Image: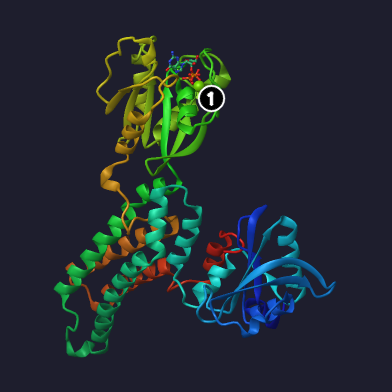
């Protein structure tokens, strides 16, 4: 591709279906770029869109100028530059949601001068036009992907920019002090101190504390976004798969009275009290000589070590707990909450005594209980209330990485300041911190990074 073509390609008017793939009542095609209105007008029968004011909608008919055949009646909404999502002229065409109409509409637009948008290209153009920063654009993608109230809430607050504003404020404070330090370098022969060292240390410490708190919130943020992992474990036949099916409201796992029915881990997510949980049903723990079952049990042990919460299913009619308890204890990680679920309450048996490492226990009948809310409450309670998401909860692995690096740089800046190292060395560490904070919001970035980020967005976004 010649350079000239590449330049042209970048600024061409783009189009894509922005609604979910498949048949729907309505589908929306988005057209953005300098010729958005002109191209749409070529395929539009009705009052000309060129005369339409920004943010107005018109009813008309879309037709194919080559065959003169009508495709569909449609509503065209016109947004004029710069007051649009991308900052360019944008037309949104709402048509009937047949997959054929959608495909044909895109074909007609392409034949008349638009090109198909790349994944995330609308958002990338919005970013390039300064309509939103990178963190906000990523929050839009998270918002679209959110499948629980908690994930939605975090994405919403990040999309509104509070997160970015706080990051930019830290960066600006650092920039100001860094400039003063660098000024000192220009007057190095006169031994002046423009940047007050105590103020600098306080600022670096405050920023270090915020950055560390933010990176520590990633464990919660990530769990809330992708589902808090909950492993359902215990001896064979305890009712684990029965419980999984009840929690999911679906017959996902096979249930039978034969011990060792579940061989492999089975997982799926469900939202409970606004939080997304990822439930993992596991192979029952028991001694076995069956090589396949042994592999399954090893997977159960791995699930124990990875889960945030364990639901330890216990069947009181089979109360030999010691062996299972030992296995669980050996694979447990220190932060895991263990809820003992004494199952088969309908049989009226006496619950066995439980080992100390169990945090809570509840009595249920996975098979007959109509209401599982005591278990639901125990689960939401186990998602540590200290880690309730805030505006600054980090859910994005890229941000997490940058925050860790920023924290390293602030640590080194603080120690340089405390040991009264020369201004240029301190300034270097502060510049590093500024750099890492700026990569989150995209103030410093490269085309490669941008392509990587936006290529994970859906087409039409
Ligand atoms: N009475 C009674 N039976 C139950 C209850 N929950 C499960 N069961 C029965 O217990 C048996 C085992 O249930 P599963 O859910 O397959 O047990 P599991 O823990 O997944 O067993 P494995 O996959 O073999 O480890 C089945 O016959 C269930 O119907 C309950 O609350 N009450
Ligand atoms: Mg099972």
Q: Residues within 10 Å of mark 1 (few under 14, many from 20)?
A: some
Confirm whether residue 54 shows in the render. Answer: yes
From the viewer's perspective, is 276 left or right of 61?
Answer: left
Q: Is residue 204 above or below residue 318?
A: below
Q: Which of the pair 201/248 is nearer the observer?
A: 248
Tell me which corner region of the image, top left, top right, bottom left or bottom right, holds residue 410: bottom left
Say which residue appears at 36% left-offset and 15% top-offset. Answer: 345
Q: Is residue 426 above or below residue 382?
A: below
Q: Quadrant of the N terminus?
A: bottom right
Count of all numbered marks drawn on residues in the image: 1
Q: Is residue 237 above or below residue 264?
A: above
Tell me which corner region of the image, top left, top right, bottom left or bottom right, holds residue 199: bottom left
Q: Which of the pair 291/368 is nearer the observer?
A: 368
Residue projecting furthest to the right: 67
Say which residue appears at 40% left-offset and 49% top-offset. Answer: 149
Q: Which residue is mark 1?
A: 295
Residue 10: x percent and y percent? 63, 77
Q: Which of the pair 252/103 is nearer the observer?
A: 103
From the viewer's perspective, is 203 left or right of 390?
Answer: left
From the viewer's perspective, is 339 left or right of 229?
Answer: left
Identify the secondary structure beneath mark 1.
helix
Confirm whether residue 419 shows in the render. Answer: no
Say which residue appears at 31% left-offset and 65% top-offset. Answer: 409
Tell me which corner region of the image, top left, top right, bottom left or bottom right, holds residue 256: top right
From the viewer's perspective, is 232 left or right of 169?
Answer: right
Say which residue appears at 52% left-offset and 21% top-offset. Answer: 294
Residue 226: x percent and y percent? 45, 46
Residue 4: x percent and y percent? 69, 83
């Amino acid at each position: 591709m010649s350079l000239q073509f590449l330049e042209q390609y970048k600024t061409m008017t783009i189009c894509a279906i922005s609604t979910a793939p498949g048949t729907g009542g309505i589908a929306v095609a988005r057209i953005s770029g300098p010729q958005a209105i002109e191209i749409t007008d070529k395929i539009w029968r009705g009052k000309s869109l060129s005369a339409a004011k920004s943010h107005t909608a018109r009813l008309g008919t879309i037709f194919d100028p080559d065959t003169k055949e009508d495709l569909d009646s449609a509503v065209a909404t016109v947004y004029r530059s710069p007051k649009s999502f991308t900052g360019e002229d944008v037309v949104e065409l709402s048509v009937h949601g047949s997959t054929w109409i959608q495909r044909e509409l895109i074909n007609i637009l392409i034949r008349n001068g638009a090109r198909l948008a790349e994944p995330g290209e609308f958002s990338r153009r919005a970013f390039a036009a300064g309509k939103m920063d990178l963190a906000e654009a990523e929050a839009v993608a998270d918002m679209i992907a959110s499948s629980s109230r908690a994930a939605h809430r975090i994405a919403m607050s990040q999309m509104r920019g509070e997160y970015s504003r706080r990051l930019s404020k830290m960066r600006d404070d650092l920039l100001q002090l860094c400039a003063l330090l660098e000024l000192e370098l220009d007057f190095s022969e006169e031994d002046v101190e423009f940047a007050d060292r105590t103020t600098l240390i306080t600022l670096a410490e405050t920023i270090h504390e915020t950055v560390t708190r933010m990176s520590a919130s990633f464990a919660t943020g990530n769990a809330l976004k992708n589902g808090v992992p909950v492993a359902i474990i215990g001896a064979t036949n305890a009712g684990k798969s029965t419980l999984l099916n009840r929690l999911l409201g679906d017959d996902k796992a096979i249930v039978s009275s034969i011990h060792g029915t579940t061989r492999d881990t089975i997982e799926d997510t469900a939202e409970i009290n606004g939080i997304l949980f990822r439930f993992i049903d596991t192979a029952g723990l028991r001694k076995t000589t069956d090589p396949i079952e042994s592999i399954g049990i090893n997977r159960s042990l791995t699930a124990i070590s990875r889960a945030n919460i364990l639901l330890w299913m216990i069947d009181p009619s089979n109360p030999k707990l010691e062996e299972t308890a030992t296995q669980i204890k050996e694979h447990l990680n220190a932060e895991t909450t263990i809820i003992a679920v004494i199952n088969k309450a309908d049989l009226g048996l006496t619950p066995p005594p439980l080992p100390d490492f169990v945090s809570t226990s509840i009595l249920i009948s996975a098979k007959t209980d109509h209401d599982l809310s005591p278990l639901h409450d125990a689960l939401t309670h186990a998602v540590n209330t200290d880690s309730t998401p805030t505006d600054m909860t980090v859910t994005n692995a890229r941000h997490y990485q940058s925050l860790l690096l920023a924290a390293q740089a602030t640590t080194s800046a603080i120690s340089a300041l405390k040991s009264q190292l020369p201004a240029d060395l301190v300034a270097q560490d502060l510049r590093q911190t500024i750099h890492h904070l700026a990569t989150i919001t995209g103030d410093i970035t490269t085309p490669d990074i941008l392509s990587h980020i936006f290529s994970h967005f859906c087409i039409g976004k």
